[in-house]
Image (tube, grey):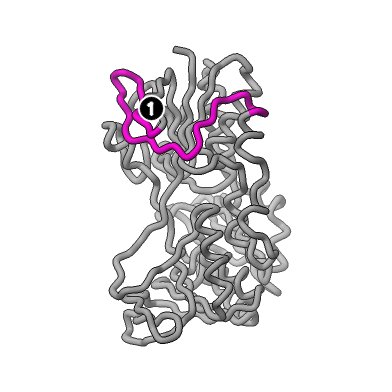
Amino acid sequence: MNNVVVLGSGLAGYTLVRELRKLNREITITLVSRDSGDYYSKPMLSNAFAQGKDAGSLVLTSAAEMAEQLDITLLANCEVRAIDRARKQLDTTAGIVEYGKLVLALGADPIRIPLQGDAEVLSVNDLSDYARLRERLAAAQSVVIMGGGLIGCEFANDLAAAGYAVSVIDPGPYPLASLMPEQAGAQLLKPLSDLSVSWRFGMAVQGVDKALSGYALTLTDGAVIHADLVLSAIGLRPRSQLAREAGLEVNRGIVVNARLQSSDAAIFALGDCAEIEGRVLPFVLPIMHAGRALAKVLNGEDAQVIFPAMPVVVKTPAHPVVVSPVARDAPGAWQTLATGNGISMGFFDPQGGMTGFALTGEYAGARSEMTRKLTV
């Protein structure tokens, strides 16, 4: 059966289909989407509010146009209930769908920590979430963001630039602590504070309750703060339950090799849901590289994904950040290369090779130059 079925209409799914169509116009492709299937840039969700963009204006191409352009069958608003690996069939709300090769581009779900209290905490992971956030912000003046990582910092900058009083609460010691060293992360504190962002580190939210006006948040240090809206941005968890129930190997994500192949030779995975040779890489550049490689594999070529240096751009216009992250346990040390209105830092291994970097403020523009210096 020479047909490919792709589950997921995000960047991973559509990138793969585009790349496969460049190589093969004959293969039958079906794309199954749990939502409308419209194509939009998910990274725009965390910096669109200050630009005055609503959910509809973020759609770049409608599902119908995507289906026509790519010559695919698109099943929108379709849930997949189970994968029958023996029969190579999917049990979906649109009926049975058969596949020759199956690609899981399922994305990830927001991590939700248990909270005491009776109030709703928002998170933004798709267009409908963003539409709900915009609706709730219409009657708000203050926002608490749970999480000072990449998404939390981007939302803090975006909402503060739009005039909201923003508080960021994070158990870590400084912003972007999972991506770069303290000297670099600390550079964000004052520029965002100047936009009315306040920071509370070394603690977390314990409970959220409805108050006479807005919400009352109890922190782990016993303090109680108030806000009109609470947004959780504490991270994403690969969406892997469907694969696990089908008996595929799952660790942090759906386990795949360099060919993006799972423990079932007919099933592949890429994007936020995939763990590629031990690494979960929920960023744009890895997804693009993986999509191109998998297209070649599905076209019958002997290919595998090889990741180059892939710097991550953090969308904080108040103080730009570019980081080429290193593994938490990587041997070596961070060194400061230059300071001014920002900082330039490199991570050097025991042999003196630079294997990562962090650039903020005026040094963010040196991304290409620093990338060329990396020992990959």
Q: Position of residue 300 (x, y in %)?
A: 52, 15
Q: Residue at x 54, y 78 (%)?
A: 140
The N terminus lies in quadrant: top left
Assign a secondary structure to mark 1: strand
Of residues 203 and 126, the one nearer the viewer is 126
Which is more toward the observer, 215 or 368?
215
**Residue plotted at (42% across, 42% down):** 273
Tell how many labels.
1
Vertical arrangement, residue 114 with respect to residue 255, above or below? below
Q: What quarter of the picture does the C terminus occupy?
A: top right
Q: Position of residue 313 (x, y in %)?
A: 62, 56
Answer above or below: position of 131 versus 224.
above
Q: Does 6 appear in magenta?
A: no
Picture quarter containing residue 216? bottom left
Reading the image, the residue beneath label 1 is 95
Height in image: 209 above or below 372?
below
- Which residue, as the protein is rendered here, is positioned at the far top? 1
Name the residue type under label 1: Gly
Please provide percent x and percent y for residue 33.
48, 37
Characterize the local packing of mark 1: few (<14), some (14-19) or many (20 or more) Cα atoms within 10 angstroms.
few
Residue found at the far front of this picture: 94
Of residues 105 and 341, the one drawn nearer to the viewer in this rendering? 105
Confirm whether residue 58 shows in the render: yes
Which stretch is magenta? 68-93
Q: In this rendered view, identify the residue nearer to me: 73 or 113.
A: 73
Q: Is residue 270 visible?
A: no
Q: Residue 63 vs residue 116: left or right?
A: right
In reply to whether residue 71 is colored magenta, the answer given is: yes
Q: Residue at x 58, y 25 (%)?
A: 72
Across and down, in percent, residue 286 comes to: 55, 42
